[in-house]
Amino acid sequence: MAVAELTSRAAAAASFARNNANSLHASQIYVPSSSSLSSDHFRTRYRSTVLPKITCSVNQVQNSAPVQVEIPKDKADCYGVFCLTYDLKAEEETKSWKKMINIAVSGAAGMISNHLLFKLASGEVFGPDQPIALRLLGSERSIQALEGVAMELEDSLFPLLREVNIGIDPYEVFQDAEWALLIGAKPRGPGMERADLLDINGQIFAEQGKALNAVASPNVKVIVVGNPCNTNALICMKNAPKIPAKNFHALTRLDENRAKCQLALKAGVFYDKVSNVTIWGNHSTTQVPDFLNAKINGLPVKEVIKDHKWLEQEFTEKVQKRGGALIQKWGRSSAASTAVSIVDAIKSLVTPTPEGDWFSSGVYTTGNPYGIAEDIVFSMPCRSNGDGDYELVKEIQFDDYLRSRIAKTEAELLAEKRCVAHLTGEVWFIHHNSSSFVSLSEVE
Ligand SMILES: NC(=O)C1=CN([C@@H]2O[C@H](COP(=O)(O)OP(=O)(O)OC[C@H]3O[C@@H](n4cnc5c(N)ncnc54)[C@H](OP(=O)(O)O)[C@@H]3O)[C@@H](O)[C@H]2O)C=CC1
Ligand SMILES: O=C([O-])CC(=O)C(=O)O
């Protein structure tokens, strides 16, 4: 296709391309054969009496090894308009643009991605001067659909979208990723809890953690969306020891947004008046939407909403169970609002947090100032100066109610962690004297 045939928006893309000719060649990755896994079996045992809520059915597990796949040369091909390479010379409008960033998205043919990818490509997330490359991960079952996604991206003529790669091998697709948005995972259906997905989805995040460790940018920021997202994020992090633990997030921003909406509704204000909302803990029905520290119009929520029983019961439960309520209505889990909340989560890391406010994210607890158990991924209040990193907020109040609720969600995450010991490299034993769980590190 000649540049002259492009429309004006695509022509703008072409002008950028001339300026960045070296990096502009997108490849579509077709991998016909499935990955090979090693069969290094070992056994892990669990006792349901200690952990009644989380039951693990994994008795025999496979250790995954790096995916070994060969990409036949004749199959390597770039995708449509993203194949175009241009000769040099910048045009005026692209001169001030930033260096392109690589964004990897798994589950790219799924419902959430179908909303998210177009927001990323539009510039809404990283800004109107930030060109991006999308690296889309699918599977053999979704490769056709992924091509459809790439076609729609092509047809949208986004000036900032410079490259699109699609593939089914995370070791290819995650190459040099600076952001990894890990969405691909089975969603729950009606009547299920998110933790019921651990057996099915946990392995995905072990494999993808290894791939990120091997090929992504060393400072890649990882947002895990696939459920149960906190423990999946922990699995991913443990399999990627070269990447700073602080870079891993589990998406709890949707819960924060839901909490803000319910508080606004009750107080009769627009939701932009609600701030300082923390979701503590797990993205599950034990999560704790914090109304003690939250504010409406700058005032403590408890001063504005006097019905404290409503806050403790109806409000809390509504936020905790919103995902399930939506599944009952839709027959599938929330997708559009999840995509919006992923956008919010990224923007919170790449723009400075407004003075005095904070945002929630599921992050690694080691070194946390709240006394929450170490070595889990727990939603906590964060602030960022906009460089992609964050700090935990120190000035937080606790009361007995908040502490007891936090303890419950903490216990659930510790139980989930034990269930996935085979995926995090930690092996747990039942101590023969005390009948309690001990980890290998405690035995040694
Ligand atoms: N943290 C949060 O706030 C939220 C998290 N979620 C979670 O996000 C995940 C994705 O949701 P959504 O995009 O709606 O789901 P979809 O079913 O639309 O897409 C999920 C994608 O995951 C991949 N996948 C991997 N393993 C499986 C499997 N065993 N069964 C089915 N699909 C699989 C598939 O892609 P492929 O074939 O290419 O691998 C599929 O396209 C789910 O786990 C869901 O629970 C949803 C809403 C909110
Ligand atoms: O409820 C689900 O399974 C999907 C989800 O995580 C949410 O909507 O919060």
Image: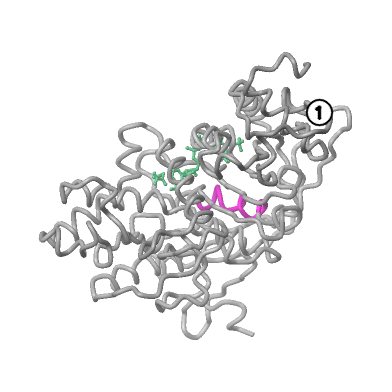
Amino acid, disc 1: Tyr
Q: Is residue 196 above or below residue 246?
A: above
Query: Quick check: 102 left or right of 188?
Result: right
Question: Is residue 203 rendered magenta in the image?
Answer: yes
Q: Residues within 10 Å of mark 1 (few under 14, many from 20)?
A: some
Can residue 31 be seen in this snapshot?
no
Can residue 177 be seen in this snapshot?
yes
Q: Residue at x 69, y 49 (%)?
A: 177
**Whole-percent x and y of residue 156?**
58, 23
**Whole-percent x and y of residue 273?**
26, 52
Query: Majority secondary structure of the magenta segment?
Result: helix
Q: Is residue 39 above or below residue 145?
A: below
Query: Quick check: 13 left or right of 360?
Result: right
Give the colour scheme shown.
one colour
Q: Residue at x 63, y 64 (%)?
A: 238
Q: Which residues are magenta?
A: 198-208
Residue under label 1, please give it.
86
**Helix, strand or loop at mark 1:** loop
Q: Residue at x 53, y 78 (%)?
A: 438
**Whole-percent x and y of residue 61?**
64, 56
